[in-house]
Amino acid sequence: MRVITEDSYFVLDGVQIRPRTVRPPSGGGVLNSANFCHSISLLTRGMFIVLYADDILLIAPSICMLDKLLKICERELDLLDMAINVKKFCCLRIGPRNNFSCSPISMSKGTVLPWVSEIRYLGIYIEQSTNFRCSIDHAKRSFYRSANAIFGKIERIGSENITPQLINTKCIPILLYGLEACPLLISDLSSLDFVVNRLFMKLFKTSNIDVVKCCQDHFGFELSSVTWLKRVKKFEDEFHVCTNLLCKIT
């Protein structure tokens, strides 16, 4: 069995590639830059292999280079006596030609990897698009599911002070999980705010948005977009710390 250390390296077209290990400050969500992450970056070829626990993300500028990265991973995992779960392995294309059909990529044992329109990585759903985009539909569904569970338990017996507090501590983190690492559009932020506003309309039995805003101010309830902007600012600060650590390593 082979163990990966700081002296380990991979070979791509005869070139030795050594892994870079980043140990940023602790704290934050899984996708937050402040979490431990192994990153094997092939900067000269625009390719990356990102490892977190047993999750592997391969990034390549072309299908040919992606196939080479896959072969490298298969070879190294064989040496480690580990196998790839082909049921969870798939390919996604991002760029101007994302809608064009792609040549199938097959593994060494002949398994063909499917091309999909959406993938899930560390709880975040990444969409097939011209630019890097994250889907918030799954987060909204999870938010509604958790909020309805709370309403089902305490809607008749809970006070007006308890329910917003539970929503803020239990449901909002589900809605915004990992989104500080995702580039959201104004329409995405409006959609997140709409989810919270509709919840307050149901809670206080009103359709007047001014009444909803007064209730949110009274309970000190921040809209999702405001919370997201604060998290993004913190994420960017920690990302700069990690970048400086990575520069010192290299």
Image: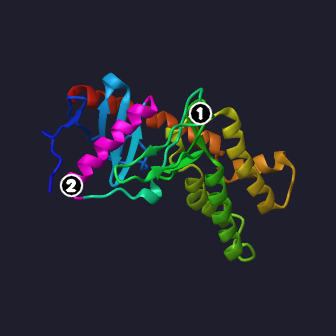
Percent from the top left, x then y, of residue 120?
A: 51, 51
Q: Earlier in the sequence, mark 2 or mark 1?
A: 2
Protein image colouring: rainbow
Describe residue 85's horizontal placement relative to residue 81 as left or right: right
Determine the secondary structure under disc 2.
loop
**Residue 117 visible in this rendered orientation of the protein:** yes
Please state the extent of the stretch shown in magenta in the rendering.
61-81
Residue drawn at point x = 27 percent, y = 58 percent:
82
Viewer-proximal residue, 46 or 121? 46
Viewer-proximal residue, 46 or 230? 46
Disc on res. 98: 1
- The residue under label 2 is 80
Quadrant of residue 46 in the image? top left
Percent from the top left, x then y, of residue 250?
A: 21, 26
Disc on res. 28: none
Describe residue 47's horizontal placement relative to residue 150 as left or right: left
Which class describes the residues within 10 Å of circle 2: few (<14), some (14-19), or many (20+)?
A: few
Percent from the top left, x then y, of residue 205?
A: 84, 61
Would residue 55 be counted in the magenta stretch? Answer: no
Q: Is residue 163 above or below residue 126?
A: below
Determine the secondary structure under disc 1.
loop
Residue drawn at point x = 68 percent, y = 60 percent:
144
Q: Residue type at mark 1?
A: Asn
Viewer-proximal residue, 78 or 53? 78
Q: Residue furthest right?
A: 207
Describe residue 49's horizontal placement relative to residue 137 as left or right: left
Residue drawn at point x = 27 percent, y = 30 percent:
246
Give the main secondary structure of the magenta stretch.
helix
Quarter of the picture containing the N terminus is bottom left
